[in-house]
Image: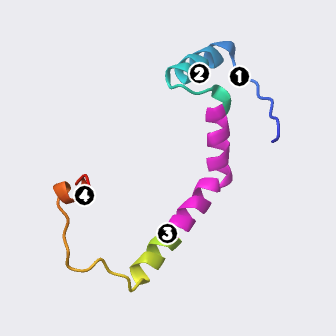
Amino acid sequence: MGNLTITIDEDSLKRARMRALQEGTSVNAILGEFLKSYAGVCREQQVAVGKIVALSRRSKARRGERTWTRDDLHERV
């Protein structure tokens, strides 16, 4: 893990801390997620999801003709 020091005005930091507290997180976590996204980590994840979707579409596996009802899925044995 790397460390980063930023400079921000006190009022903005105070409001950010209050909002983060309301959301059950921290300013550090929010900035970390933003920087990951900014650095392209989210794009890499989107590419990976796209590859999985493409593989599933090419798959020859099928579920068959059976349909499921809510009762079937929640039947207790």
Label 2 vs label 4, nearer the camera: 4
Label 1 vs label 4, nearer the camera: 4
- Where residue 6 appears, x then y in whole percent? 77, 28
Instruction: Give the position of the C terminus as an image quadrant.
Output: bottom left
Q: Residue 3: within the magenta?
A: no
Label 1 vs label 2, nearer the camera: 2
Instruction: Give the position of the N terminus as an image quadrant.
Output: top right
Sequence-wise, the earlier of marks 2 and 4 is 2
Sequence-wise, the earlier of marks 3 and 2 is 2
Sequence-wise, the earlier of marks 1 and 4 is 1
2 left or right of 51 in image: right
Q: Which residue is mark 3?
A: 50
- Where residue 47 appears, x then y in whole percent? 56, 66
> How far, Cα to Cα, is label 3 from label 2?
34 Å
Compared with residue 45, is residue 6 higher up or lower down, i.e. above or below?
above
| Count of numbered circles in the view | 4
Q: Which residue is mark 1?
A: 8
In this view of the protein, which residue sits in the foreground, 12 or 70?
70
23 left or right of 5 in image: left
Callout 3: helix, strand or loop?
helix
